[in-house]
């Protein structure tokens, strides 16, 4: 029996109905140790707390390793090592510091397959993304900042730049290795030393990274890594030796940090949450926009601070966009993060899965209309299907709060003015997307949107040379580019 032909064969391929995908698992070994201690003064160091916590793989819910729980005394030892290393490291010529950064970048490239597999096992993101995005972009950040290390004089012409001292850095779980690279590379390029704390659900690649630092011959104490949860992070923030704190994570924790540092002379940069508007005008290339919408919200399961989580569509094309988007969503493959065909992997943790379920529940309760394609979710591990809400109003929680999951809310608008007003009607201001055929409209909109990063006819593009950061409750300070570099230096 021939399969039933679709009404519009040019636009809808039926492969999904005719053939099953074969499993295509990535099988390279991840080399995850059964236990990781702290990394202090260039050495693996057992925690003074004598405590370790489990790290699990969200793909199947199984324990993969044990991670040291750093207490205040451990954090203190890390700061002591960083402070002791600072005089020599900061006096090392930029060209020499740059060589270490180049070496780190090349070693990351050499081991990128292994690191990609480890990242996917530990955090749940699809191997396609850790392989093609996280690892190459992390290496690119080290390369880029290696280039700056001996050219700092050009970053502030006519002025002299000096490092800040020891910087405390706290990173989240959505891009574990990439956020580490964003933090460590500019700090070292400027001559600072570092105490970094990874997120508690995703510490594995940071600990694996310590072996790269050793292989690169980085002097002991220049980078120290302490693992643990919020208490460990708070100890990093409060330590008197910190000259600067750089934080990426949730807005409530960011506010607490800003409070805690008020009245001290510590510098602070915060990269917090977002609720980005992805705006589609009627003159946009709709098929291309649909790909951009999908990338904007389903990339990394939607665990992206700059995710395009509020879709604003011009009313005249709303029905067409919705139809094409639903069709596209039916073709997304959700499941085993290690499978090379997987588009949407596992939700990072049970806690995050519960948060997503809670917010989706509120969307239903408040009267929005839900669409989820039929998809079989694995029986073990943490998974959530791609989800679309229409009939959303600006007052709904799903339109205001950061969901940090694969959940998109659609709103419509009639005029560009209305689009700007709706887009800016949020406490956040991290990113936005504009889809239109008209260059003048892009420039006009970009000037009116209150967001730190604005993409036009594309989404989620990252380059180490391009500064990233927000306004309002999305935080302040920039990462990447000359602007990000200068956040790790002072003018003397
Ligand atoms: P979180 O802000 O608690 O975690 C981020 C990092 O901060 C982790 O390393 C954590 O251990 C650390 N931390 C927690 N409390 C701290 C404290 N008092 N002092 C210093 N460091 C502390 O975020 P969480 O609970 O993992 O996620 C909750 C929500 O936050 C997510 O659903 C998402 O909406 C948002 N989020 C946003 C991120 C972003 O990139 N903008 C990243 C992670 C979460
Ligand atoms: Mg984990």
Image (cartoon, rainbow, N blue to C red):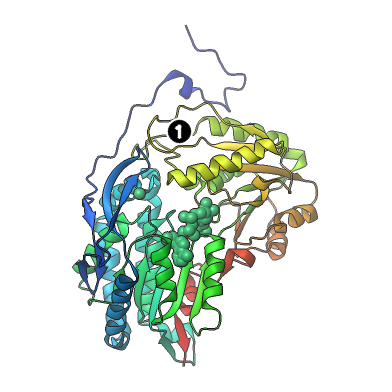
130 to 482, vertically: above or below: above
Determine whether 382 is above or below 188 in the image.
Answer: above
For residue 461, say whether it is visible: no
State the residue at coordinates (59%, 52%): 402
Return the residue nearer the eye: 287 or 390. Answer: 390
Left or right: residue 482 versus residue 378 is right
Ligand 2 within 8 Å, label 1 CB: no
Q: Residue at 40% across / 45% down in the picture?
A: 125
The image shows residue 465 at horizontal and vertical percentages of 47, 68
Horizontal arrangement in the rendering, residue 14 relative to residue 395 (left or right): left
Q: Which one is nearer the viewer's eye here, 106 or 176? A: 176
Question: Looking at the image, which residue is at 48% across and 69% down?
Answer: 479
Q: Position of residue 180 (x, y in %)?
A: 38, 64
Q: What residue lies at 32% left-to-right and 50% top-to-bottom?
A: 55
Left/right placement of residue 389 relative to residue 130 reads right
Q: Nearer the viewer, residue 75 or 93?
A: 75
Q: Kindly identify which residue carries mark 1.
A: 333
Observer-nearest residue: 76 or 312? 76
């Amino acid at each position: 029996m021939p399969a039933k032909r679709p009404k519009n064969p040019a636009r809808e391929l039926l492969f999904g109905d005719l053939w099953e995908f074969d499993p295509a698992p990535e099988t390279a070994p991840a080399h995850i140790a059964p236990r990781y201690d702290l990394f202090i003064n260039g050495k693996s160091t057992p925690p003074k707390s004598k405590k370790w916590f489990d790290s699990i793989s969200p793909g199947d819910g199984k324990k993969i390793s044990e991670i040291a729980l750093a207490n205040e005394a451990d954090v203190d030892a890390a700061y002591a090592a960083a402070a002791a290393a600072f005089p020599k490291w900061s006096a090392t010529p930029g060209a020499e510091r740059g060589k270490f950064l180049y070496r780190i970048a090349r070693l990351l490239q050499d081991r990128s397959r292994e690191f990609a597999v480890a990242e996917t096992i530990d955090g749940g993101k699809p191997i396609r993304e850790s392989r093609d995005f996280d690892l190459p972009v992390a290496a690119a950040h080290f390369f880029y900042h290696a280039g700056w290390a001996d050219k700092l004089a050009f970053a502030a012409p006519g002025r002299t730049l000096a490092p800040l001292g020891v910087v405390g850095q706290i990173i989240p779980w959505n891009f574990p290795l990439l956020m580490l690279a964003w933090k460590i590379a500019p700090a070292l390029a400027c001559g600072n030393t570092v105490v970094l704390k990874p997120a508690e659900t995703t510490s594995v690649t940071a600990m694996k990274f310590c072996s790269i630092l050793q292989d690169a011959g980085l002097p002991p104490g220049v980078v120290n890594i302490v693992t643990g949860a919020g208490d460990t992070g708070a100890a990093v923030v409060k330590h008197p030796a910190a000259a600067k704190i750089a934080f990426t994570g949730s807005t409530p924790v960011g506010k607490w940090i800003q409070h805690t540092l008020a009245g001290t002379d510590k510098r602070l940069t915060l990269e917090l949450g977002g609720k980005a508007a992805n705006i589609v005008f009627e003159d946009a290339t709709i098929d291309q926009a649909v790909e951009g919408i999908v990338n904007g919200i389903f990339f990394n399961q939607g665990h992206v601070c700059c995710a395009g989580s509020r879709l604003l569509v011009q009313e005249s094309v709303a029905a067409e966009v919705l139809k094409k988007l639903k069709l596209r969503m039916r073709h997304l493959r959700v499941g085993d993060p290690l499978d090379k065909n997987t588009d949407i992997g596992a939700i990072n943790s049970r806690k995050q899965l519960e948060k997503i379920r809670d917010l989706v529940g509120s969307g239903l309760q408040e009267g929005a209309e839900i669409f989820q394609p039929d998809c079989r979710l694995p029986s073990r591990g943490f998974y959530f299907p791609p989800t679309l809400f229409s009939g959303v109003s600006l007052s709904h929680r799903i339109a205001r709060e950061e969901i940090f999951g694969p959940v998109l809310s659609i709103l419509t608008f009639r005029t560009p003015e209305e689009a700007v007003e709706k887009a800016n009607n949020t406490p956040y201001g991290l990113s936005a997307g504009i889809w239109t055929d008209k260059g003048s409209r892009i420039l006009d909109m970009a000037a009116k949107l209150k967001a730190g990063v604005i993409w036009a006819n594309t989404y989620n593009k990252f380059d180490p040379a391009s500064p990233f950061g927000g306004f309002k409750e999305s935080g302040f300070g920039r990462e990447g580019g000359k602007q990000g570099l200068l956040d790790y230096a002072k003018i003397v």
